[in-house]
Amino acid sequence: MSAPVKAGGRVEAPAVIGSLGSRRRAIVIGAGVGGLATAVRLAHAGYRVTVLEQHEGPGGRAGAFESMGFTFDRGPSMVMMTECWHQLFRDVGRRLEDYLSLVRCDPTYRLHFADGATLEMTGQLDRLLANLERIEPGCGPRALEFLAYTGELYRRGIEFINRNMHRPGSMLKVGGMGLRYGAGALGDLQRMVGRYFKDERLRQALTFQSLYLGLSPYDSLAIYGLLAYTEMAGGIYYPMGGMVQLPLALERLAVELGVEFRYRTPVSRLDRAGDHIRAAILQDGTRVPADVIVTNADLPYAHDQLVGEPYPGIDRKEFSCSVMLLYLGVNRTYPDLLHHNLVVSTDLRASCRQLFEDQVMPDDGPFYVVANTRTDPSMAPPGSENLFVLVLAPSQNPARPIDWAVEGPRVEQRTLQRLEQFGLTNLRRHIVTKHLFTPADFTSRYGNLRGEAFGLSHGLGQIGYFRPHNRHRRYRNLFFVGQSTHPGCGLPMVLISADCVVQRIREEVSAP
């Protein structure tokens, strides 16, 4: 259980031996996973840390809400690369297992193709090969070669991104991955996967994962092939009690290390002086001074709203796509669903073209259905089902903005119809509670500039050294953590982002 929220929205830290006045002060703005992990690492490094969060509890996009007895995950729906979580806890002398219970989901998910074929992905190699062979007979040996290649790509790629990238020569280190993997990583994802599989359905099954980054699988670097390997080799997991248990575990750990949390405490701006930030100014005018400030608010928002100046060249940056989320509590079950289910559109390439190039909402885009009661029945009342439906959506084009007050309900009705056609019989008759979250809500709740769900895009021109750096170019004690700085979006990446930014703080700011 997390520490209780006190009156006024505080989670108070236990008494710390020694004089707090002699310790350097750090403020973390935002209690998303990246901010929480940063607070943990800063506290372990000796800082006196205060987390300022505008919402009522921790987690950000990885939070939760309840309605009519149903508990809904707000955003992320699975845990990948669990080694990143174990590493964080080990680095501060703890064990992840003492803070939460992760359960492996296997099969990882089932894909439903337009021709009626299905494919179950699994971490059990013999079953995986058999399932792939049913789609493309004879592909087994090539599937093993694919796993070997993407496995090495994964190992070298993770080693590559686990470092700061703010120096001009940073990208040259890609050569350290070796000619085959370094150059190969920057190639075309479709071409790379096409070397191993000829059936278009298998190519879709092993490239759609770049959508996790808000990036089209038809315009992705080959390095993102490691995501398919991660699912198959490392597995995907779910925390008992819902995804919010991840930030709650980090909050509990942070409090043990002396971190103070102040919820319902929005920051309105930063007090600037010379080349430093002196304090965070709260919405009520309170001034909170600090020696180091790390903002977990999305980077373009932090620049524009907190610093008071747009990020340089933000209009030339590419943004990820968005999503529309539909949370459904239904008073029956659909036992044919797995925990994770992906429905591939009739023409995935055309759908991606509409989403990423035309920036319009396709009528037949892919959608993703999560039934987390398969793993944790406590998430819904007995005999009921908790459904999380994700439909890909474009980010906002400032020249042709979408009115989500109109488009949202239209897409919702179309999605409910498609779900019933997919096999969720009489779904609309059984809905007890329903909530819609559109790209406009990503802007209003999380400050995403274009309503995007995954921050700045992850093309070649916006990764590594070319991604916004994790320290402000002028204010030398203002740092950034999260999806729009290095290395990018996704829970494992923001954990790495926290590690990188604290490494940089320890190098560039005098030690506590």
Image (cartoon, grey):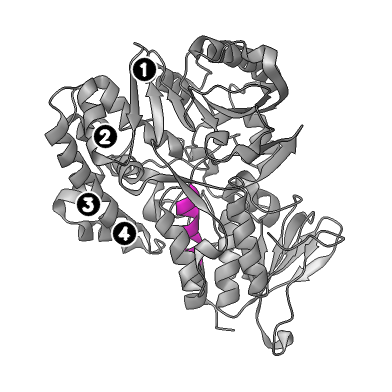
Question: Tag 3 or tag 4, which sits nearer the N-term?
Answer: 3
What label does residue 160 carry, if any? 4
Residue type, label 2: Leu
Image coords of residue 360 (percent x, y): 52, 19
Image coords of residue 332 (percent x, y): 64, 21
Q: CA distance from mark 4 to mark 2?
A: 29 Å
Question: Tag 2 or tag 4, which sits nearer the N-term?
Answer: 2
Closer to us: mark 2 or mark 1? 2
Residue designated by label 2: 128
Q: Which residues are magenta?
A: 489-501
Q: Residues within 10 Å of mark 3 (few under 14, many from 20)?
A: some
Q: Residue at x 62, y 21 (%)?
A: 402
Does residue 215 appear anywhere in the picture?
Answer: no
In the image, taking residue 49 as reference, residue 422 lies left or right, namely left
**Among the 4 quarters of the image, the one containing residue 265:** bottom right
Question: Tag 1 or tag 4, which sits nearer the N-term?
Answer: 1
Q: Nearer the viewer, residue 159 or 396?
A: 159
Q: CA distance from mark 2 to mark 1?
A: 17 Å
